[in-house]
Image: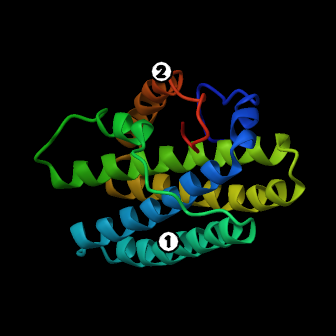
Amino acid sequence: MLGLKLPTDPRWVNIAEKNIEEILTDHAYCEQKAASTAISLIVTYPEHHDLVREMSALAREEMSHFEMVFKKIEQRGYTLGRERKDEYVNRLQRFFPKTPDRNLRLIHRLLIAALIEARSCERFKVISEHINDKELADFYRKLMISEANHYTLFIKLARQYGSREEVDGMWKSLLDYEADVIKDFGNKEHIHG
């Protein structure tokens, strides 16, 4: 369903499991960044009322996920660490060339957001199926469903602002690029790392 070309090695969970505090901190910031992205899309494209409605709801949901992760951090006696750069996301953002076409920039942003949500969904599935901590397995199983819904929302919106053929072609190219990028990740206790 997600279309990802290179699945996460389930052994990545062994890395994450050795430092749950780190994975939860990274996850919390991923949720915060997702909310920020939704808000940025509202600010940049206020003329698209359907986009504004969807992103308003998404920003609230992503912040509620941030709060849920933060509660897990507190319940376990951990501390929310500092935000770290997400090199995976930075590399994805370099895929599309700069363009003066405002609508095309919107489509690019929506496709990148869809891919980030798809990879997060896939990572949450891997965690839920392979982590020994039953509480976190259940937690990530529930969040996996939300991530899948976010992925489909971003794809649907991208197709709304461009021809399906054009958008699907860009999506396929982005998936191919991501498969090459993700080879360099999976050795850190980060959601995309």
Q: Earlier in the sequence, mark 1 or mark 2?
A: 1
Residue 107's place in the image compared with 178, above or below, is below
Residue 28's place in the image compared with 120, above or below, is below
Name the residue type under label 2: Asp
Label 2 element class: helix
Name the residue type under label 1: Leu
Q: Is residue 171 left or right of residue 145?
A: left
Q: Disc 1 to disc 2, how far (Cα)?
A: 29 Å
Label 2 Cα crowd, 10 Å radius (few <14 / some 14-19 / many 20+)? few
Percent x, y for residue 160?
39, 58
Q: Nearer the viewer, residue 18 or 133?
A: 18
Residue 181's place in the image compared with 17, above or below, is above
Name the residue carrying label 2: 180
Label 1 element class: helix
Q: Residue at x 78, y 56 (%)?
A: 141
Q: Quadrant location of residue 126?
A: top right
Q: Nearer the viewer, residue 39 or 106?
A: 39
Q: Is residue 95 left or right of residue 179?
A: left
Q: Nearer the viewer, residue 182 or 113?
A: 182
Q: Residue at x 38, y 74 (%)?
A: 50
Q: Quadrant location of residue 167?
A: top left
Name the residue carrying label 1: 58
